[in-house]
Image: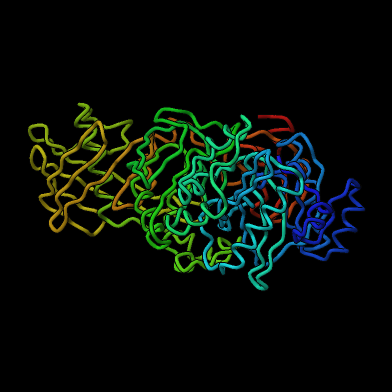
């Protein structure tokens, strides 16, 4: 929960962003306040957090629709739909300060965290210290955060959040979260402080273990910390949450400077009823550049099969030149979308390893006939040696556009040797060894030794190859599609995830236009609109409000 009191903050000398924070929630009044402040404005739930119940309104024409959506999401998430309206800064950074106070009037700031890399107003990467921040501004942020906590007689752990205007260098108080944040391990990494232990000390009536000067000296010597949030979601589909069973899970090696906070193991179910975050990966290093390199290396060790995740997207962030340079802002993802969402195509070696892994797995399990024929027919058998044609595709990650297809032929020439042809590439005398427990396939190609994790899940195959993940699928023969009753759904609208229908915005017979909202759904504590991909007429509505 967040508390806000603009008058108290102003009286304490804490700069506040222009806005309306009153009790009048009449939509017409809020709209008038937005016009007075000047667009764009930010609608935000008073009891909000994690980006829920928050909307950017850029014009007066979209205010009413965005207000309804924000209030609905806030009500579902927090049981309260009271909103505030604030001026939206167009080139902002999100910088927050971890504070701690005790009952004796002591209050310290344990450094700041830059949380500017966000999607849907929710943080993806957090780091400390904040890059490119002058030391006098840094210490002024600490001072104003302490003033905010002392102004309300606060005790315990809290996070004072600020919007930093990159154009002017000014910062404004947003809110104070009266708890530890998801990103508190970043602060622990750069201060060496156990914040949970401090909570117990203060709750028992003890005084703070360190002074502000002692904390400052620690921060000056401990380098950089970065946290990446691991989400079950598909970044290529506007970060739509995903759910399902964790078929395969391998985490990076934990060390003193590589920390993983997680609550799932292989075989667990990621439910659609909760937030999609499944883990936090935190690294520490002497410098920011080294911390980014360490984070990228740790992400390359992560292997998750089942729900889609944001891990590949996080890797791209770690390789993005402007992020490496520290030029961050809350609109970073939108600004660098062409770079961050560029499609990564598998080369022929990836398709070869995928097909070879499938075949080696079947051989190890004694299944030489294939699975439902997906691996093609077994031809040219000589003393049990296999010759397979295995069509594999990489479906478009956003569900739009064409798939990348490879026609793979695998001819077994010995117990562990194969000739492999992928489209126009030919790899003779490839020796391979498959480890069923780890699902790792080690192959000696003519010019390279490749170690690849190949995981089959129904008709899909996930390949982890040279630090990247590829989500591939078999190409089912036409007779299988008929046997399984696969329907033509070209003119249907499907939800991208398990969900509950909150509102149906159209009726049968309605004429709709491209991008018009059709249905509003809720999943993983997030509300989103399903929009029409084209102009057309609604012929049939299969699900009504309340269906889940």
Between residues 398 and 110, which one lies in front from this camera angle? 110
**Could you tell me which quadrant the N terminus lies in?**
top right
155 lies left or right of 245: right
Q: Residue at x 61, y 29 (%)?
A: 204
Q: Residue at x 56, y 51 (%)?
A: 110
Between residues 385 and 10, which one lies in front from this camera angle? 10
Total label count? 0
When asked about the image quadrant of residue 78, the answer is: top right
Q: Position of residue 154 (x, y in %)?
A: 71, 42
Q: Is residue 521 visible?
A: no
Q: Residue at x 56, y 67 (%)?
A: 135
168 lies left or right of 371: right
* As drawn, 400 above or below 23: below
Q: Position of residue 82 (x, y in %)?
A: 82, 43
Q: Is residue 478 visible?
A: yes
447 lies left or right of 78: left
When asked about the image quadrant of residue 463, the answer is: top left
80 lies left or right of 402: right
Between residues 296 and 547, which one lies in front from this camera angle? 296
């Amino acid at each position: 929960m967040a508390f806000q009191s603009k008058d108290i903050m102003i009286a304490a000398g804490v700069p506040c962003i222009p806005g309306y924070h009153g009790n009048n929630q009449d939509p017409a009044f809020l709209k008038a306040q937005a016009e007075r402040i000047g667009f764009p404005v930010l609608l935000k739930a008073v009891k909000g957090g994690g980006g829920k119940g928050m909307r950017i309104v850029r014009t007066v024409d979209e205010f009413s629709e965005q207000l309804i959506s924000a209030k609905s999401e806030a009500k579902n998430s927090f049981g309260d739909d009271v909103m505030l309206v604030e001026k939206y800064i167009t080139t902002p950074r999100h910088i927050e300060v971890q504070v701690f106070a005790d009952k004796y009037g002591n209050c310290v700031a344990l450094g700041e965290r830059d949380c500017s890399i966000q999607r849907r107003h929710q943080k993806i990467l957090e780091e400390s210290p904040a890059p490119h921040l002058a030391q006098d501004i840094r210490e002024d942020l600490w001072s104003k955060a302490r003033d905010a906590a002392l102004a309300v007689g606060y005790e315990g752990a809290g996070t004072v959040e600020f919007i930093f205007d990159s154009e002017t260098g000014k910062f404004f108080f947003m809110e104070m979260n009266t708890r530890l944040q998801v990103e508190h391990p970043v602060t622990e990494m750069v201060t060496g402080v156990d914040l949970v232990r401090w909570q117990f000390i203060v709750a028992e009536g003890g005084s703070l273990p360190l002074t502000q000067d002692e904390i400052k000296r620690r921060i000056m010597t401990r380098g950089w910390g970065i946290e990446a949030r691991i989400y079950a979601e598909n970044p290529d589909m506007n970060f739509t949450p995903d759910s399902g069973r964790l078929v395969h899970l391998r985490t990076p090696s934990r060390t003193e400077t590589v920390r993983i906070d997680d609550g799932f193991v292989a075989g667990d179910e990621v439910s659609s009823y909760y937030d999609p975050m499944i883990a936090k990966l935190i690294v520490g290093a002497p410098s920011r550049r080294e911390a980014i390199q360490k984070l990228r290396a740790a992400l390359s060790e992560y292997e998750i099969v089942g729900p889609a995740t944001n891990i590949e997207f996080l890797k791209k962030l770690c390789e993005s030149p402007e992020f490496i340079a520290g030029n961050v802002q809350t609109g970073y993802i939108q600004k660098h979308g062409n770079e961050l969402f560029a499609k990564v195509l598998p080369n022929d070696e990836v398709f070869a390893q995928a097909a070879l892994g499938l075949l080696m797995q079947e051989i190890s399990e004694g299944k030489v006939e294939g699975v439902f024929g997906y691996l093609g027919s077994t031809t040219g058998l000589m003393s049990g040696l296999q010759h397979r044609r295995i069509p594999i595709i990489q479906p478009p990650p956003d569900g739009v556009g064409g798939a990348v297809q490879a026609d793979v032929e695998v001819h077994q020439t010995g117990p562990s040797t194969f000739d492999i042809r992928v489209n126009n590439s030919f790899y003779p005398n490839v020796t391979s060894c498959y480890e069923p427990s780890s699902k790792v396939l080690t192959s000696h190609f003519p010019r390279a030794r490749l170690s690849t994790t190949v995981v089959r899940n129904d008709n899909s195959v996930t390949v982890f190859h040279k630090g990247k993940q590829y989500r591939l699928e078999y190409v089912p023969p036409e007779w299988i599609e008929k046997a399984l009753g696969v329907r033509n759904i070209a003119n249907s609208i499907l939800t991208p995830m398990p969900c509950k229908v909150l509102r149906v915005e159209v009726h049968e017979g309605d004429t709709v236009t491209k991008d018009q909202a059709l249905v509003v759904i809720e999943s993983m504590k997030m509300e989103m609109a399903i929009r029409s991909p084209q102009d057309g007429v609604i012929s049939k509505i299969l699900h009504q409000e309340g269906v889940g």
